[in-house]
Image: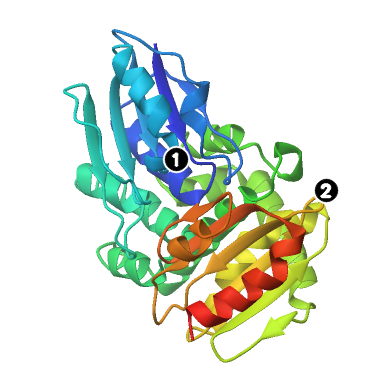
């Protein structure tokens, strides 16, 4: 049995599209909303089974990774999040780089020697690595309009992955992957799957318009914090809204705080684009926090810790 385990955001989807266009394989798809990263716990594999893991933190899946290795499974693990100590095993192949200008789609592009670079560019744009995406796009013979189309698609795919539950999303990530994976490049997808593309585009634009009307609950020299309501559109837009704020104001850190049904908060943090460090360390100071240096989050910030979080992000980036 083969398993493809991947993050439900643009980076995870675009990384797997590249890999499976180059190396076709029938596999069980294991994915979920972007914040659902403890995915290896869903896999039962043993001798003769192949598990491919893309764009989820090894550190957050360590116990299940060790369980699968002990059971005899062969594992390829590619990621750009904090990994911690990597287990030593002849059954484990890793391609991990936590640098702030790298994402899983770019790592897979390097492994495949640029076989499906347009998909890698799309994934990097979706992960808000605009400089990296633009540098890679220059290796392709694309017009400015085509590069913009890849950026838009990456943002829309990434937007689709946010929300604490699949019912908040326009497409379940496994379903969206299957639509994308039919095509050698993103332009084919946008042409052949026009109705699906427009569903993503319209949803993104409507949700971002609602978010743009909000005022921050905190705005200081070093950081700004926005609070979104407990609504499906707000949960969908939480991450891409943070990216948009970061791009508009690159000297300031940003946090987007979204109310959860249980009274806690879902928090999305973006380090200043001029100083893409520390977001993961900041979020790990709070329960359920983690991520990477440039972009991180807290899955369930207790309501009584919101003010402490606001004070901490302001001091952290001061």
Q: Nearer the viewer, residue 264 or 122?
A: 264
On the image, the x and y values in percent for residue 237 come to 69, 60
Q: Is residue 184 visible?
A: no
Colour option used: rainbow
Q: Nearer the viewer, residue 290 or 239?
A: 290
Query: In the figure, residue 314 lies in which quadrant?
Result: bottom right
Q: Secondary structure at mark 1?
A: helix
Q: Secondary structure at mark 2?
A: loop
List the residue tagged with mark 2.
Answer: 261
Q: Residue at x 36, y 51 (%)?
A: 82
> How far apart in space, not on screen, are marks 1 and 2 (Cα)?
24 Å
Residue placed furthest toward the top: 47
The residue identified by callout 1 is 60
Residue shown at the point (28%, 12%) measured from the top left: 72
Residue at 51% x, 60% y is 285
Is there any visible trace of residue 29 in the rendered image?
yes
Q: Is residue 204 above or below residue 169?
A: below
- How many circles with numbers are drawn on the protein? 2
Quarter that holds the N terminus: top left
Q: Residue at x 51, y 35 (%)?
A: 38
Quarter of the view holding residue 305: bottom right
Left or right of 304, for residue 126: left
Disc 2 packing (10 Å; few <14; some 14–19; many ≥20): few
Q: Position of residue 121 (x, y in %)?
A: 38, 58
Q: Of the two numbered discs 1 and 2 on the same chain, state the one appearing first in sequence.
A: 1
Residue reaching furthest to the left = 90
The picture places residue 140, in percent across and down from the top left corner, at 28, 62
């Amino acid at each position: 049995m083969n398993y493809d385990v991947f993050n439900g955001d643009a980076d995870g989807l675009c990384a797997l599209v590249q890999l499976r266009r180059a190396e076709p394989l029938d596999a069980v798809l294991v994915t979920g909303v972007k914040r659902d990263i403890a995915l290896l716990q869903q896999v039962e594999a043993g001798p003769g089974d192949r598990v491919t893991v893309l764009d989820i933190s090894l550190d957050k899946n360590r116990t299940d990774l060790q369980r699968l290795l002990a059971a005899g499974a062969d594992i390829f693990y590619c990621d750009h999040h904090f990994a911690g100590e990597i287990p030593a095993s002849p059954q484990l192949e890793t391609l991990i780089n936590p640098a702030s200008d790298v994402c899983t789609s770019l790592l897979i592009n390097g492994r495949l020697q640029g076989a499906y670079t347009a998909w890698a560019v799309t994934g990097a744009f979706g992960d808000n690595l605009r400089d990296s995406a633009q540098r890679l796009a220059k290796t392709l013979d694309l017009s400015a309009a085509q590069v913009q189309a890849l950026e838009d698609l990456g943002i829309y795919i990434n937007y689709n992955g946010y929300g604490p539950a699949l019912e908040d999303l326009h497409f379940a990530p496994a379903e969206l992957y299957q639509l994308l994976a039919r095509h050698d490049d993103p332009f084919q997808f946008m042409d052949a799957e026009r109705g699906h593309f427009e569903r993503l585009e319209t949803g993104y634009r409507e949700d971002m318009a609602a978010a743009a009307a909000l005022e921050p609950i905190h705005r200081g020299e070093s950081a700004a914090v926005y609070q979104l309501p407990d609504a499906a559109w707000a949960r969908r837009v939480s991450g891409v809204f943070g990216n948009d704020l970061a791009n508009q104001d690159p000297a300031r850190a940003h946090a987007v705080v979204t109310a959860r049904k249980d009274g806690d908060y879902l928090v999305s943090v973006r380090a200043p684009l001029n100083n893409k460090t520390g977001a993961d360390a900041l979020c790990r100071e709070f329960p359920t926090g983690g991520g990477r240096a440039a972009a991180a989050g807290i899955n369930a910030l207790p309501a009584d810790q919101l003010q402490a979080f606001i004070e901490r992000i302001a001091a952290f980036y001061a």
